[in-house]
Image: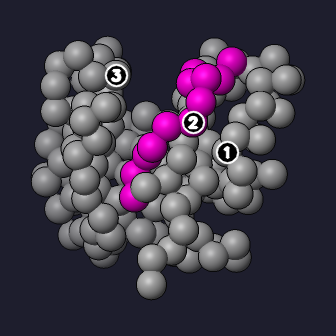
């Protein structure tokens, strides 16, 4: 069962400049940064708030690190802006299979590793009214 909006992914040309905009304009601070080589992006997660299920909601800023990445291709076609929406779930495997059973194309056969050690998969935007949709199971909280 989907429990929250985990994050909104925003594609950008210059991660540092975009982070500074969100910091200066809204007061959002960077919670986490990483380079995801598999997806070809450098990213910053800006934590917006905690959620009832113990997770959080974020803005995920994405800058491509290579021209053949999905985000680079998307930026070339669309320019900067909202790239995807991600919903949190306790069971990305089960929920993606249930959604696949309803006729929605799931882009990965098996969930992959996402930001901050999460497990993720994507749903085809043509099956989701034009919205690239991600399902996310957060990694266990490290103490």
Can you give x and y, in whole percent of width and height, for residue 56 in the image?
A: 54, 69
Indicate the quadrant where residue 135 lies: top right
Return the residue at label 1: 92
Q: Residue at x 49, y 53 (%)?
A: 118
Residue lying at the far bottom in this picture: please name it: 143
Magenta-colored segment: predominant secondary structure? loop
**Crowd class of label 2 (few under 14; some 14 to 19; many from 20; radius 10 Å):** some
Circle 2 sits in a helix, a strand or a loop, which is it?
loop
Q: Is residue 114 magenta?
A: yes
Whichever of labels 3 and 2 marks the residue nearer the N terminus, that label is 3
Residue 143 versus residue 67 in the image, above or below = below
Label for residue 111? 2
Q: Is residue 100 visible?
A: yes
Residue 136 versus residue 103 in the image, above or below = below
Q: Kindly report the distance in space between the C-alpha atoms of the residues bearing marks 3 and 2.
A: 17 Å
Circle 1 sits in a helix, a strand or a loop, which is it?
helix
Q: Kindly report the distance in space between the C-alpha atoms of the residues bearing marks 1 and 3.
A: 22 Å
Assess whether mark 3 and mark 1 are in contact (beta carbons under 8 angstroms): no
Return the residue at label 3: 70
């Amino acid at each position: 069962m989907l429990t929250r909006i985990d994050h909104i992914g925003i594609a950008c040309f210059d991660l540092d400049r975009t982070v500074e905009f969100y910091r200066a304009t809204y007061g959002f601070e960077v919670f986490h940064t990483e380079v995801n080589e598999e997806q070809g992006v450098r990213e910053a997660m800006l934590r917006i708030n905690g959620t009832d299920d113990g997770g959080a909601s974020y803005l995920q800023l994405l800058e491509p690190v290579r021209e053949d990445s999905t985000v680079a291709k998307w930026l070339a076609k669309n320019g900067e802006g909202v790239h995807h929406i991600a919903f949190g779930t306790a069971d990305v495997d089960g929920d993606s299979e249930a959604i696949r059973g309803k006729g929605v194309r799931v882009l990965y056969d098996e969930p992959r590793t996402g930001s901050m050690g999460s497990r993720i998969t994507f749903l085809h935007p043509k099956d989701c009214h034009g919205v690239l949709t991600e399902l996310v199971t957060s990694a266990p909280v490290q103490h």
